[in-house]
Amino acid sequence: MKIRTIASSTFGSFLYNRVVLVICIPVVGFFLIGLFMVLQFKRMTTGGNLEVMQFQTMQTLGQNLSVLIDLGSLLAVWAAADSVASEMKSGTILAVMARPLHRWQFLAGKYLGVLMLMSVYLIGSIGATYLLMHLGGLPPHTSWWILFIYPLVRYAVWAAIAIFLVNFMPPLVVLGAVAALSSTIWFFTTEYAINNIPAWIAQSIHLVLPLTTVILSEDRFFSMTEAALKRYAWIDHATALAYGVDYALVVFLLAVAVFERRSLTRD
């Protein structure tokens, strides 16, 4: 009950957070771009070029959705870090913790509020994409739950990392640190890194940053969204998702352990 109350309050506060609103603006922008593409598709399509136009339009809509999903990672990081730091900075956390509330419940409520925000973000992004496909008469080749659950698990990982890091640094620095982690993840999935980095270094990085592994890498995620090209058994989905949830849980518990021992007064 206490966790749910904090989660609802946290989610409501995001509706008035200017940074969160600014990050959500691209959803509208990409929807308008997609709408223009769909209208162009319907206007220029003939019997002879139907397949080519379908491919080009679907590719554009897919690229737009991919960008929105990537942008969601930054939103998850900022929302998680700022939701905790703002309470510390304003001093309102002292009033909250004066009630019979454990510190882990406070963080759990914040974390759940962030996941609620990201769920709404994904529903909006995916819903807009499916609406555009419907307007253009384009067949959806991807199960909606794949497009929803995989990014949500990734956001859960990033949000947990942000809540852990905000114990040591301000939100903007956390955002920069996560950007550096993202760059590292991207680098270790490149062909150059695979062919030139010593195996023991690569394995160490994979243990610390599992998003670089095949389980939750960008390549695997986006290949999963191309259901018509490559299919996975349910056990593959279960393994990947369980791995991501487990990693997020471990990092969140580390964040709780640090938060339990830190001062609640303003730094």
Image (cartoon, rainbow, N blue to C red):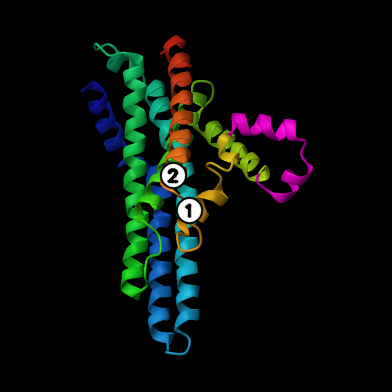
Give the residue at x 67% y 42%: 188
Position of 178 with respect to 121 (left or right) is: right
Query: Residue lying furthest left in this view?
Result: 1
x and y percentages locating residue 19 in the rendered image? 42, 43
Q: Quadrant of residue 227?
A: bottom left
Q: Is residue 126 magenta?
A: no
Q: Quadrant of residue 29?
A: bottom left
For mark 1, give the secondary structure: helix
Magenta range: 189-209
- Specify the amino acid type for callout 1: Met
Q: Residues within 10 Å of mark 1 (few under 14, many from 20)?
A: many
Q: Residues within 10 Å of mark 2 (few under 14, many from 20)?
A: some
For mark 2, give the secondary structure: helix
Mostly what secondary structure, the magenta segment? helix
Q: Quadrant of residue 160?
A: top left
Q: Is residue 190 magenta?
A: yes
The N terminus is located in which quarter?
Answer: top left
Residue nearest the observer in this picture, 256 or 200: 200
- Specify the amino acid type for callout 2: His
Distance from label 1 to label 2 (Cα)?
9 Å
x and y percentages locating residue 16 in the rendered image? 31, 41
Q: Earlier in the sequence, mark 1 or mark 2?
A: 1
Position of 162 with respect to 125 (left or right) is: right
Mark 1 vs 2: CB contact within 8 A: yes
- Residue under numbered circle 1: 224
x and y percentages locating residue 130 in the rendered image? 34, 63
Give the residue at x 38% y 78%: 39
Give the residue at x 43% y 33%: 245
Does residue 92 appear in this view?
A: no
Disc ID at residue 237 = 2
Does residue 259 appear in this view?
A: yes
Q: Is residue 241 above or below residue 266?
A: below
